[in-house]
Amino acid sequence: MWKAALQITHDCIFGERCRTFQVEISVISFNPYERKGSIFIHHMGTVIGKNSSDALRDIGKDHRVVHIETEKHTFFIVEKRAKKETPGGHHHPEIIYTKPVLVRRDGIERWELAALRKEVLMEFVKGLKQSGTTVSIASIKQAPLTDIYFPALSPDFSEQQQNALSLAKKEGYYDFPRKAWLAQLANVSGVSISTFREHLRKAERKLLSTAH
């Protein structure tokens, strides 16, 4: 199998909200269908960050969203788009998404895809560019099957666990060398070190459990 990691910038219902509310969104888009000249796409995912509730409310107001269900920070959305607005290469019968799309706080999306042939991935990228999407290839290489799997979409974080994980990532707790320490993160959160450590460890445990 061939595997590609892409960085994408395009007009969508998620990118602008990530920039505005400083959240991240992990989302799987699936089951597109055409009806009366419009394209309908299903999205399911989770919003990560302390402003996640505000971001979800704003997404629900978008004219392209015809249905939304939320539970905590997890959502299911039906989006309606004009056929001409849907990138031609967004859904391809020979390509699989190996991970949920990650939309970062700056609105840039990371897509990880796989196909039997490299040429299929390159044609996919070409189609995205022709549709007006900004695309850069972070990597493209042959990968073993053990690198191609479908993790669970979203652990069931509590709000405190989600906020602790988001803050730790943002402040560089997981960087090497480490840029932040538990005491600093706890101080920013306004809780004790032991409380922050508990929230963060529970969130990490849930993340690790989805990878198996």
Image: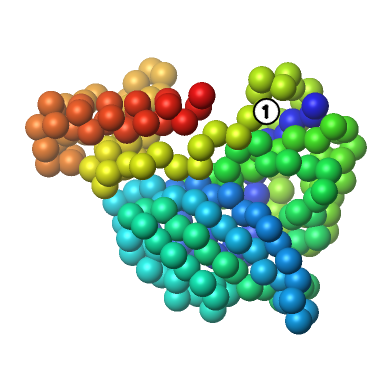
Q: Is residue 164 left or right of residue 69?
A: left
Residue at horizontal 13 percent and vertical 28 percent from the top: 193
Which secondary structure lies at badge 1?
loop
Residue at horizontal 14 percent and vertical 31 percent from the top: 195
Q: Is residue 13 visible?
A: yes
Name the quarter where the N terminus is drawn.
top right
Q: Which residue is identified by label 1?
A: 148
Residue 124 pos. (x, y %):
82, 47
Q: Quadrant of residue 41?
A: bottom right
Residue 15 pos. (x, y %):
53, 58
> Is residue 178 depicted above or below 115 in this figure?
above
| Total numbered circles | 1
Q: Please, what is the three-letter code of the amino acid marked with disc 1?
A: Ile
Q: Label 1: how many residues lie within 10 Å, few (<14), some (14-19) or many (20+)?
A: some
Residue 156 pos. (x, y %):
36, 42
Q: Which residue is outermost to the left?
A: 192
Looking at the image, what colour scheme do you see? rainbow
> Is residue 113 depicted above or below 140 in this figure?
below
Residue 56 pos. (x, y %):
40, 63
Q: Is residue 171 visible?
A: no
